[in-house]
Image: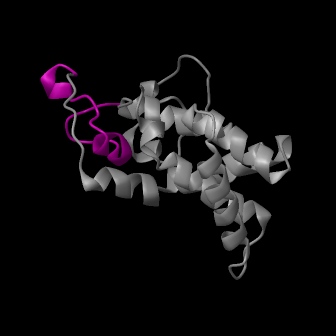
């Protein structure tokens, strides 16, 4: 599974919001939730740790930065409900929609860019059906439906796992 910092930075990178500036002071815990800086620049201490990174087995200061690997339900909930993921999903969908406005091309690009795989025929059909169903919901438009699809893909096991 991806390390917590790589996962966070990947989400921001896909959204086009990752700040790649090098150097500078560490980002203190209070400012980390709204920071676009790479996770490498986060201040680490035993007492104040980033909740999102901690959920995905952030390296511990007191254990010489060794990482444990766990799989717990709270990780799925963090990816599902995290403000970082929800905001980024909309930005990713808007970015991909601008580049590929037609639905089939959007789905193919979303699978390729987010999961790193070619979409299978069954997945393409299911994705088209899901987009169609989401567009029928109240107060929903094409971008909102596409945001839902991106959100689902960010929660897919293949996004957080390197094979």
Q: Is residue 26 visible to the viewer in this orientation of the structure?
A: no
Residue closer to the observer: 121 or 83: 121
Give the x, y percent position of residue 24.
Answer: 52, 21
Q: Against 61, is 99 above or below?
A: below
Q: Residue at x 72, y 78 (%)?
A: 136
* Residue most extreme to the left: 63
Quadrant containing the C terminus in the rendered view: top left
Quadrant containing the N terminus in the rendered view: top left
Give the x, y percent position of residue 89.
Answer: 61, 51
Q: Quadrant of residue 149?
A: bottom right
Q: Against 24, is 8 above or below?
A: below
Residue closer to the observer: 147 or 8: 147
Q: Main secondary structure of the magenta part?
A: loop
- Left or right position of 115 against 141: left
Residue closer to the observer: 155 or 49: 155
Task: Look at the image and name its color scheme.
Answer: one colour
Q: Against 67, is 136 above or below?
A: below
Q: Magenta residues, as a range?
A: 42-65
Give the x, y percent position of residue 60.
Answer: 21, 29
Q: Residue at x 55, y 39 (%)?
A: 11
Magenta span has 46? yes
Give the x, y percent position of residue 17.
Answer: 65, 38
Q: Quadrant of residue 70?
A: top left
* Residue most extreme to the bottom: 138
């Amino acid at each position: 599974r991806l390390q917590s910092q790589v996962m966070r930075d990947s989400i921001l990178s896909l959204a086009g919001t990752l700040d790649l500036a090098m150097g500078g002071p560490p980002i203190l815990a209070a400012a980390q939730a709204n920071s676009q800086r790479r996770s490498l620049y986060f201040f680490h201490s035993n007492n104040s740790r980033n909740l999102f990174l901690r959920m995905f087995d952030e390296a511990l200061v007191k254990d010489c930065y060794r990482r444990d690997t766990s799989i717990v339900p709270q990780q799925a909930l963090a990816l599902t409900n995290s403000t970082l993921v929800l905001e980024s999903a909309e930005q990713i969908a808007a970015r991909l929609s601008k580049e590929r406005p037609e639905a089939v091309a959007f789905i193919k690009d979303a699978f390729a860019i987010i999961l790193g795989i070619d979409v299978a025929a069954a997945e393409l059909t299911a994705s088209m059906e899901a987009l169609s169903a989401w567009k029928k919901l109240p107060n929903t438009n094409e971008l909102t439906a596409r945001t839902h699809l991106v959100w689902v893909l960010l929660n897919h096991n293949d996004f957080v796992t390197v094979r």
